[in-house]
Image (cartoon, rainbow, N blue to C red):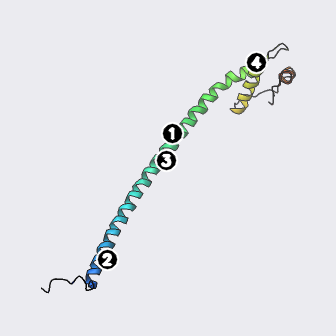
Amino acid sequence: MADQHDPHSPTPTSELDETLKGVADETIRLLKRIIMVMGVAMVVLLVVSGLLVRWALTEHSRVDAYLAGQCPFFYVLAVLPVPPATSEVGVQLVEGARSALVRQACPEHLPPPSAGLLALGRKYGIPIPY
């Protein structure tokens, strides 16, 4: 009967040491798993971020190429002569083409607006800044 432990007596320190060692070992294993999962998540995040940056740069290049292809079209409209009888829509079209050339940084040299275009812009309340 020496094997039985009295429930009212204190637990021997050797049993507490073993229990604490087991808890510490389990905690360390859990922390190692957490660190491994976080490492894998970071690698996945870096790979996905790299792919997104590459995609964005590719799309940016495609958009730039598309916009550069529009420059000749806008240039033709931007330098159209504007007769005095031009409608408000006609002035908006020329002003829009001039603005597009500037916004898209087209290589074509944009001459200053004609006096007629400036006068019609004032008449219709359309600012002609370029």
Instruction: Tell whether label 1 touches label 3 (CB within 8 Å).
Output: no
The residue tagged 1 is: 55
* Above/below status of 123 relative to 33: above
Q: Which mark, residue 49?
A: 3
Mark pair 2, 1: CA separation: 52 Å
Say left or right for 59 vs 91: left
Residue at left offset 14%, top offset 87%: 2
Question: Residue 126 lies in what quarter of the image?
Answer: top right
Mark 4 or mark 2, whichever is nearer to me: 2
Residue at left offset 67%, top offset 26%: 71
Q: Which mark, residue 89?
A: 4
Give the mark nearer the N terminus: 4 vs 2: 2
Residue at left offset 70%, top offset 23%: 74
Say left or right for 44 vs 117: left
Mark pair 3, 1: CA separation: 10 Å
Q: Which mark, residue 20?
A: 2
The amino acid on which the numbered mark 2 sits, given as a three-letter code, is Leu
Q: Secondary structure at mark 4?
A: helix
Mark 4 or mark 1, whichever is nearer to me: 4
Instruction: Tell whether label 3 touches label 4 (CB within 8 Å).
Output: no
Give the mark nearer the N terminus: 4 vs 3: 3
Q: Secondary structure at mark 3?
A: helix
Give the mark nearer the N terminus: 2 vs 1: 2
Relative depth, front residue between 10 and 68: 10
The image position of residue 14, as x and y in percent, is 26, 83
